[in-house]
């Protein structure tokens, strides 16, 4: 799943790849997420969040898939609700 955030006509794109269960991904979001959103809102770039479930295979279970489904429900409502849901997860 890929979720765009920011102005569609932004000249540059920042691609962020993550698994909802990944602690390193959460660290990036905690440390830089607000900056990503502020810069995207300013039109500096558009963020494209690319989601994967690679940790389900490595660690077992379906936690990444379930989290991704929940985030998908939020993005169906609006990019703003997705950003709030993603920020709460981190």
Image (tube, helix red, strand yellow):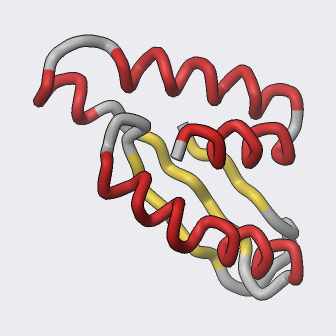
Residue 39, compared with residue 6, is above or below; it is below
Say left or right for 27 vs 80. left
Rendered image quadrant of residue 48: bottom right
Residue appearing at x 38%, y 55% in the figure:
25
Residue 12, compared with residue 87, is above or below; it is below
In the image, farthest residue toward the left = 58
Residue 49, compared with residue 34, is above or below; it is above
Say left or right for 88 vs 58. right
Residue 68 picture location, percent across and down: 51, 26
Residue 13 picture location, percent across and down: 63, 76
Residue appearing at x 52%, y 47% in the figure:
90
Residue 2 picture location, percent across and down: 58, 45
Q: Nearer the viewer, residue 6 or 81?
A: 81
* Number of numbered discs visible in the structure rendering: 0
Say left or right for 7 vs 32. right
Residue 32, compared with residue 42, is above or below; it is above
Residue appearing at x 87%, y 28% in the figure:
77
Say left or right for 51 vs 32. left
Quarter of the image that includes the N terminus: top right
Q: Nearer the viewer, residue 26 or 44?
A: 26
Residue 22 picture location, percent across and down: 31, 44
């Amino acid at each position: 799943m890929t979720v765009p955030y920011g102005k569609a006509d932004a000249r540059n794109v920042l691609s962020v790849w993550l698994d909802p269960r990944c602690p390193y991904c959460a660290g990036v979001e905690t440390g830089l997420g607000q900056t990503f959103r502020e810069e995207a809102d300013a039109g500096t770039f558009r963020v494209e969040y690319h989601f994967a479930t690679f940790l389900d295979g490595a660690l077992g279970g379906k936690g990444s898939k379930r989290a991704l489904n929940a985030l998908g429900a939020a993005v169906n409502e609006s990019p703003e609700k997705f950003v709030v849901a993603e920020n709460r997860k981190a």
